[in-house]
Structure formats: structure tokens, C-alpha cells
Image (cartoon, rainbow, N blue to C red):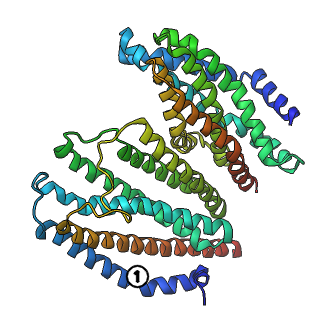
Amino acid sequence: MRALLVRDLRLALRAGGGFGLGLAFFLIVVVLVPFSVGPAPELLGRIAAGVLWLAALLACLLSLDRILALDFEDGTLDVLATAPLPMEAALSVKALAHWLTTGVPLVVAAPVLAVLLNLPAAGYSGLVLSLALGTPALSVIGTFGAALTVGIKRGGLLLSLLVLPLYVPTLIFGAEAARRSADGLDATTPLLMLAGISAGVLALMPFASAAVLRVNLR
Amino acid sequence: MSLWEYANPVKFLRLSERVLPWLWALAVLCLVSGLAWGFFGTPDDFRQGSTVKIIYIHVPAALMAINGWFMMLVASLIWLIRRHHVSALAARAAAPVGVTMTLIALITGALWGQPMWGTWWAWDPRLTSFLILFLFYLGYIALWSAIEDPDTAADLTSVLCLVGSVFAILSRYAVNFWNQGLHQGASLSLDKEKNVADVFYHPLLLSIAGFVLLFLALVLYRTGTEIRVRRTRALRARQGAGG
């Protein structure tokens, strides 16, 4: 398992893969927001938490097809399927690698970009905490979407159509937690719900992902 | 003699051919009488005026939108567990009907909301979760049409339907938490005293029955079509292989 994780991380870092691209996309979306809604600081401060969450979600979505597509093409997945490691574990490791290369950098970058959007000072801890709790769910759900569409040529758009509705609950609770803490309110409930979603999908989603991947490798 | 006998496509087709004319007739009868009774036979509400009559389309359509997904869920489970092709095809056949029902519910709701709430759309929990259900239907249909191999497509869409159901329910509660609503409570429920007045209640029941029958008829009909499409394709493949 560790070998697989190290391999995935190394590939992502060396091949100029999702690591830099996801972050750059996150940056660009956030920079584009003031151009579309205007530079008024109070307006930006009010929408900052939601915009950052949405941008993080989109950046995550963008890098999903890299989780499995390349391994599917060069046959690595077939090797994994016959390996003693159960498919569920392999996919969990892949989701973890995706989170480490996409989710974690987003969490680290978010407070920096929040400055650009004039996020109220009270909101930083809530933003970082909610992203840290929510992005694992995004990676795990995304792995399911990637496993679902791995056999389809040019499945990128379909992948977004399938995954985005699944992201709704995570986005609602995550953005709600970030917004509440930015408004100086108590964000415990949405944070707990968010952690619950993450824990739930971490436990259950690999089974669904492995099931559809087995079908696709049949 | 058990229900599973109809997993055989031939038997299924024979049965559905016998049942379908009756279903169509009953559906049309219920719909026409229910809607006509509703539209012309009931008084205008003293606050809502004649817009109240949208209820005869809105409520049944919304009901069938949710039950349509539920039917797909059951059919998907049957496919995953017992591998009956008819079941997978029935799920496939139900999706476009369900998405149409969802759209009808959303549009009639908007038409009613404009004069009553003063807005076509509000980010109310019920409205929003219906919109999300609509997206789930779209994704499901898109996945069916994206995959060539029918068995793979049936497997993948079935799992998507299961996962989607969980997330649809999750979204329903998340949305509830996110925004308090404008939409009134359930018009009909099993455990409460009914909160629709008697004059509106009976024609409403009739049009709900009409929508249920219409849904069944459409799904049966479309399943039959899917079976024939599959059979035609198999025949063609065999011909092609034979030279």
C-alpha cells in the first residue's frame, strides 16, 4: 500500500501533474471573481468563504480524471486488479494520494487567497478547518466518479455531470461552516456534519468505487 | 408461478402487451376525469383564486418524480442481485419519464409561485432538492447513453443509482439545514389529517391515480421498446457474423 502511495505521489509531483495545475486553477478562479462581481471590499468579504469553497471544489474536480485515466491506459490498473491488495484498499490509497496532492495544497493556499478576497479575520480558522475536513470527501467521491467514467473516451464532461450533484452536501456544509465563522457565528454544527460526511464516504465509498472499477476492467 | 417468471423477456412482453391497453385506457380515464373535475368542477380558492388548480398537475408529477427514482433504485437492486435484464432495461426506461415528471413539477411550481410568492424561483429546500434530483436524473441518463456495452452500462448505472439515492437523501437534509423554506408542508401524508380540503381532495386523488397509471404505462411501453431494440441489435450482430 505504501509503495502505491509513494508511486502515485511521485508521479503527480514529477509529471507536472495535478499538483501545480489544481493550485493554479484555484488561484485563477479566485482572481477572476472580483472582475465578475466588482471590487467592492464589503461585497467580496461577504462572498469570500463561498467563493473559496466553490473554487476549491472546481480545482478538485479538474484533477479527478488524472486519478485513474493514465493508469487505465498503460495497464497499471489491470496489474492492481490481480494484485493481492484488495481493490477497495488500492482505490482508498489513490484517493489519499489525490487528496495529498490536491486537497492539502488547496487548504494551505486558501488563507492566502482569502486575503485577496478580504475575508473577515474571524473566518480564517473556520475556512481552513472546513476545507481540511471537507476536501477528503471531495477526493473520495471524486475517485468514485473517476472509476465510473474510466472506460469512456473523453469522459471529462460526463465526470463533472456525475460528480457535481454528489458534491452538493459537502459543499453546503463546508461553505456554511466557513460562512458562519466569517460572520462570527458558531460553526460547530456544520463542521460536525461535514466531518460526518467525510467519515461516512471514507468508510463506504471505496466499496462502490471498487465495484464500478471491477466492472470497467471486466 | 412466481413474479420472477416475468424476468423472461418473452413472457414479460406477452404480459405487457396484454396489460398495456387497459393501463392506457385507465390512465387516460383517470387523468381526463380527474383533471376535468379539478379544473371545472371545483371552486376557486378564496385566497389563491384559480391558480390553486395547478395542484392537480404539480402534486402528482412531483410524487411520480420521486417514486420514479425509487422504482429505478429497486430495479437496479434487482439487476445487481439477480441479473435480470428486463429489470435493468426497466430502470433505463423509467429515467426519461422520471426526468420529465421532475421538469413538470418544477415548471408548474414556478408558474404557481410567480403569482403566489411573487417569484418564479426561490432557493427553498424543496425546490432546491428537486433541482438536484433533476441533475441526478440527467447524470444517470447521460451515463446510460455514454457506454456501448449494455451489461457494463447496466452495472455502472445501477451502482450510480444506489450511490445517487444516498446522496439525494443527504442533499435533501443538507438543503433543509441550509435555508428555511417558502414551500408549504406536504399536501398529502399518510400519518396526518389531510390538509387539503375535501372539494380539492377527491379530484386530486383521481389525478394522482392517473399519473401513477400513466407512469406505469409509459415505463412498460418503453421497456418493451428497449427489449425489442436489444433483440434487433442481437439479430443484426448475428447476421453480420454469419456473413
Q: Image height check: is B122 above or below A152? A: above
Q: Nearer the viewer, residue A12 or A192?
A: A192
Quarter of the figure that contains the C terminus of chain B: bottom right
Q: Closer to the camera, B65 or B49? A: B49
Residue A17 lies left or right of residue A61; in this view the side is: right
User: Residue at the spot x=57%, y=71% of the render?
Assistant: B87
In the displayed structure, would residue B32 be above or below residue A122?
A: below
* Quadrant position of residue B192: bottom left
Would residue B241 appear left or right of A185 to someone viewing this image?
Answer: right
Residue A185's x, y, as percent?
45, 21
Q: Tell me which corner region of the image, top left, top right, bottom left or bottom right, holds residue B215.
A: bottom left
Above/below status of B216 relative to A126: below
Q: Under tag 1, what secondary structure?
A: helix
- Quarter occupied by residue B39: bottom left
Chain for numbered disc 1:
B
Q: Residue at x 46, y 11 (%)?
A: A120
Label 1 belongs to which residue? B20
Instruction: Kindly identify the residue that appears in the image at 43 percent across and 36 percent down.
Output: B178
The answer to whether residue B119 is seen in the rendering is yes
